[in-house]
Amino acid sequence: MANAAPNNNTPNPAKPPKPHARLEKWIWILIYGGLFLVILGIATGRTEPALGWSMAIPGGVVALMGVVLIYVRSRLGDK
């Protein structure tokens, strides 16, 4: 009995979730929402240029802000 293999019936612990996974999800939603506004602004701008620009410019700023947030988060990393 002294040379018996140890009993490893304990399950492997689950991989812990990334600490900022929810934040990253919302940043991607921000990027896609901004890109949607850009596309909608371009499509609307053919008939109503003022309305198209008023959607495309803020949408582009929002999408660019999201890309910068993703870049900064990837450079900082979870160290």
Image (cartoon, rainbow, N blue to C red):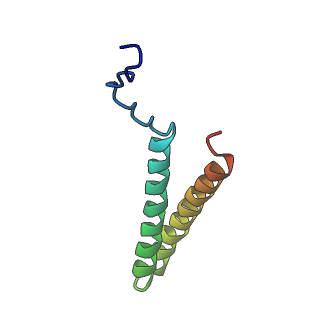
In the image, 5 versus 46, the foreground residue is 5
Measuring 34% from the left and 29% from the top, which residue is drawn there? 11
Quarter of the image for residue 37 reads bottom left
**Quadrant hosting residue 7:** top left
On the image, the x and y values in percent for residue 27 come to 50, 52
- The C terminus appears in which quarter of the rendering? top right
Q: Residue at x 31, y 25 (%)?
A: 9
Q: Quick check: 8 above or below 61?
A: above
Q: Nearer the viewer, residue 48 or 43?
A: 43
Question: Which residue is found at the position 47% from the left and 68% from the top?
Answer: 35
Say which of 17 and 66 sits in front: 17
Residue at the extreme left: 9
Count of labels in the image: 0
Residue 57: x and y, percent? 55, 69
Q: What quarter of the picture does the N terminus occupy?
A: top left
26 in relation to 33, above or below: above
- Give percent across and percent down for residue 12: 38, 32
**Residue located farthest toward the bottom when viewing the structure as drawn:** 46
Quick one: which residue is furthest to the top in this view? 2
Identify the residue shown where x is 51% and y is 36%: 19
Residue 56 appears left or right of 47: right
Q: In this orientation, which residue lies closer to the viewer: 70 or 39?
A: 70
Q: Quadrant of residue 45?
A: bottom left
Residue 52 lies, with reference to residue 59, above or below; the image says below
